[in-house]
């Protein structure tokens, strides 16, 4: 199966890099799937999950909170304002925050964290 080079970057670190068979993420225009040979593009990211299916078969799941994505020459670069991998999400802390949350934007971010943690 054809692969694409993927870089998932946050403002403070490189989160994941490698070859992948597909990437699924949420842009401001809706959900987007990216495969090898995708046309060049630049898009803003919405708060949402990112799923990367690595060349080895591993599924990388992350909660992304804004940023943008570029696709060019069979390379996907995801620049996230904030990013948490599935294994980094503290579910108890997220549930506690949701129970006390009254800010719609923070509620949405915590719901995305839970969705990724439970994926």
Image (cartoon, rainbow, N blue to C red):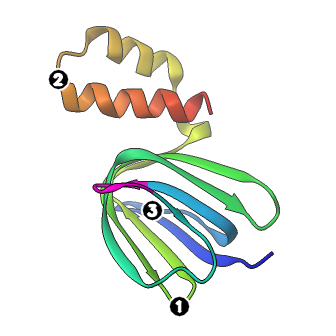
Highlighted range, magenta: 26-31
Q: Of callouts 2 and 1, which one flags the residue occurring earlier in the amino acid sequence?
A: 1
Q: Which residue is mark 3?
A: 13
Q: Nearer the viewer, residue 30 or 82?
A: 30
Does residue 99 sit above or below 69 in this rendering? above
Q: Nearer the viewer, residue 55 or 27?
A: 27
* x and y, in percent, of residue 10 in the image: 40, 60
Q: Which residue is mark 2?
A: 103
Instruction: Classify mark 1: helix, strand or loop.
Output: loop
Q: Is residue 81 magenta?
A: no
- The answer to whether the residue labelled 2 contacts the one labelled 1, judged by CB atoms less than 8 Å apart, is no
- The answer to whether the residue labelled 1 contacts the one labelled 3, judged by CB atoms less than 8 Å apart, is no
Callout 1 crowding tier (Cα within 10 Å): few <14, some 14–19, many ≥20 = few
* x and y, in percent, of residue 33 in the image: 53, 61
Alpha carbon separation for disc pair 1 and 3: 23 Å
Quadrant location, the C terminus = top right
What number is the disc on residue 73? 1
């Amino acid at each position: 199966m054809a692969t694409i080079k993927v870089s998932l970057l946050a403002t403070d670190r490189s989160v994941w890099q490698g070859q992948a068979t597909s990437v699924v993420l949420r842009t401001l225009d809706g959900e987007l799937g990216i495969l090898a040979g995708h046309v060049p593009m630049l898009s803003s990211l919405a708060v949402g999950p990112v799923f990367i299916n690595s060349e080895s078969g591993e599924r990388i799941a992350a909660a992304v909170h804004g940023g943008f994505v570029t696709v060019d020459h069979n390379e996907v670069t995801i620049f996230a304002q904030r990013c948490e991998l599935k294994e980094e999400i503290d579910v108890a802390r997220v549930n506690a925050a949701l129970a006390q949350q009254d800010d719609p934007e923070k509620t949405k971010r915590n719901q995305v964290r839970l969705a990724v943690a439970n994926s």
